[in-house]
Image (cartoon, rainbow, N blue to C red):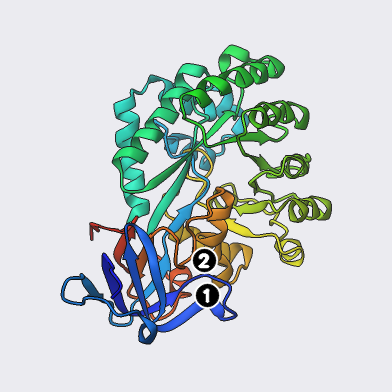
Amino acid sequence: MTEFDAVWLNAQLATMSDTGKPYGAISDGALAVKDGIITYVGPKADLPAFDALATPLYDLQGQWVLPGFIDCHTHLVYAGSRANEFELRLQGASYQQIAAAGGGIASTVRATREASHETLFTLAKDRLNALQAEGVTTVEIKSGYGLDLANEQKILEVAALLDAHHPLSIKKTFLGAHALPPEFKDDAEGYIAAVCQMLPTLHNQQLVDAVDVFCEGIGFSVAQSRKVFAAAKALGLPVKAHAEQLSNLGGTALVAEFAGLSADHIEYLDDAGVAAMAQADTVAVLLPGAYYFLRETQLPPIALLRQYQVPMAIATDLNPGTSPFCSLQLMLNMACTLFRLTPEEALLGVTKHAAKALGLADRGTLAAGMRADFGCYAISQPAELCYQYGVKPLRQLVIGGKICRLEH
């Protein structure tokens, strides 16, 4: 007789696996967990015999079960608010005027530098709680609001503390090459050299899972980004980039050259860049929140991504300046309405493809051997998660085989 720690019965399973059926769906399904791992997923009729008296059973009464959602691009650890800038822009102020007055990313850097570990932890925990309430089980957190060794380290240490003390699984990305700090005003080359020197120190403290750059006209050039990627590669760290958000600079091709995990934003990506991504098996991370908040008009090349079969992930890009949205479910709706993704593409984007964007092979689908990360939803069909926003259909969330308390 098979031993399970818990069994879920009478479920509709959206496995998000390649089964030939939409959403990898299994009707009248069952799911079983042992030691934090899914050990059975499939038709209830085929569930191996087990001791039903000694095993916790959960009758889902037809609820849908999906893999735990993965928010694969956030800047979640920061202090301060930019609501004042939001208001100023709507009153007619330009970005240049706001920046000249000390606003923009510089204001977030100041506030984050001034904040303690405890303050940053508390602010970030509230944001993680909001994501968890929607079914998110894994979150990537980028640094990039410290812009010197001590403060970049502080942000990544807070991310590590969240990983240790919050139910969600956290992946830490070093984004030192996010913007120029005041100490290196007009000296981008000097700052890139400093970033490359920070990286080994942070890596030695086990604070870095991946390395990111902002490769853009208002960020860093392809040549400067290459130096950061080379430093990452020397340490065996995977790379990714904010690329082609505002212009077609070539950052995506650079990521592909380094066999990077993902290229993110990519509104201005061309045919050659998409082909390079396909060749390198690099994920396209779409960030509809930033597109919406900045009122952009250049859509990502969705048709090309489909043509070249490049996996598309969806993320919040949660940050105080350009995507102040702490809701992955809202991003599902925006991806469908603004970018015209199908609900199945959008849900793949926050499960299977989001896991791939973080280099995680142990989650993102419901399959035997995968981490027991999944959510149970009171919905009639998976598309409902993309269609409606504002209600809370999540009824149960399991992370690493443990049921998490939900606040309603």
Q: Which residue is mark 1?
A: 23
The quadrant of the image that shows the N terminus is bottom left
Q: Is residue 323 left or right of residue 48?
A: right
Percent x, y of residue 387: 47, 72
Give how far across and how far down residue 340 sits, in percent: 62, 68
Residue 71 rendering spot, x and y as whole percentages: 48, 51
Q: Please, what is the three-letter code of the amino acid marked with disc 1?
A: Tyr
**Mark 2 surroundings: few (<14), some (14-19) or many (≥20) residues within 10 A:** many
Residue name at image x 69 percent, y 56 percent: 300
Label 2 sits on residue? 347
Callout 1 secondary element:
helix
Choose between 74 and 331: the one closer to the eye.
74
State left or right for residue 53 relative to residue 126: left
Classify the position of the C terminus by image quarter. Answer: bottom left
Give yes or no for contact between labels 1 and 2 (Cβ–Cβ under 8 Å).
yes
Tell me if I can see residue 288 in this picture: no
Residues 30 and 183: in front is 30
Residue 25 image point, x, y percent: 48, 79
Q: Earlier in the sequence, mark 1 or mark 2?
A: 1
